[in-house]
Image: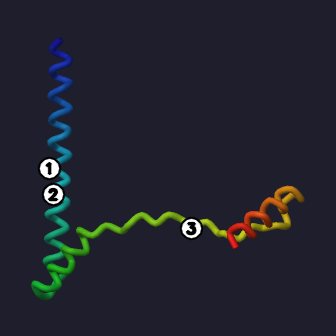
Amino acid sequence: MSEFVLFGVIIVLAGLLYLRERENRLERAKLVNALMSKNATELRDLEFVDKVTLPKVTPVEDPLTATADMSDEEFDKHIEEQLKNG
C-alpha cells in the first residue's frame, strides 16, 4: 500500500518539476525579448508574436486528374462528372 502512495508522490513531484521548468522557459524567453528590443514598442511586438500561433493549413487537393492512367469506365465516369459540375 505504501508503494502506491510513494508512486503518487513521485508523479506529483514530476508534474511540479515540469511546471517549474516550463515557467522558467517562458521567463527566459521574456528576458531575451527584453534584451533584443530597443524600446517598449518593439518589446510589445515581440511578445505579441510569441503569443500568435499559425493556423493549420490543410493541403489542397489538385482538381486535375491524370486521365492517361484511367480505364475506359473511369474515364467515362470522370467525363460525366465534369459535365455535371459544368
The three-letter amino acid code for the residue at tag 2 is: Asn
Residue 54: x and y in percent read: 36, 68
Q: Which residue position holds label 1?
A: 20
Vertical placement of residue 79 versus 38, above or below: above
Give the Cα distance between marks 1 and 3: 41 Å
10 Å crowding of disc 2: few (<14), some (14-19), many (20+): few
Q: Which mark is residue 77?
A: none
Say whether residue 82 is left or right of residue 49: right
- Circles 1, 3 touching at the beta carbon (< 8 Å): no
The three-letter amino acid code for the residue at tag 1 is: Arg
Q: Nearer the viewer, residue 67 or 81?
A: 81
The residue located at (74%, 64%) in the rendering is 81
Q: Which residue position holds label 3?
A: 60
The residue located at (17%, 84%) in the rendering is 42
10 Å crowding of disc 3: few (<14), some (14-19), many (20+): few
Mark 1 vs mark 3: in front = 3
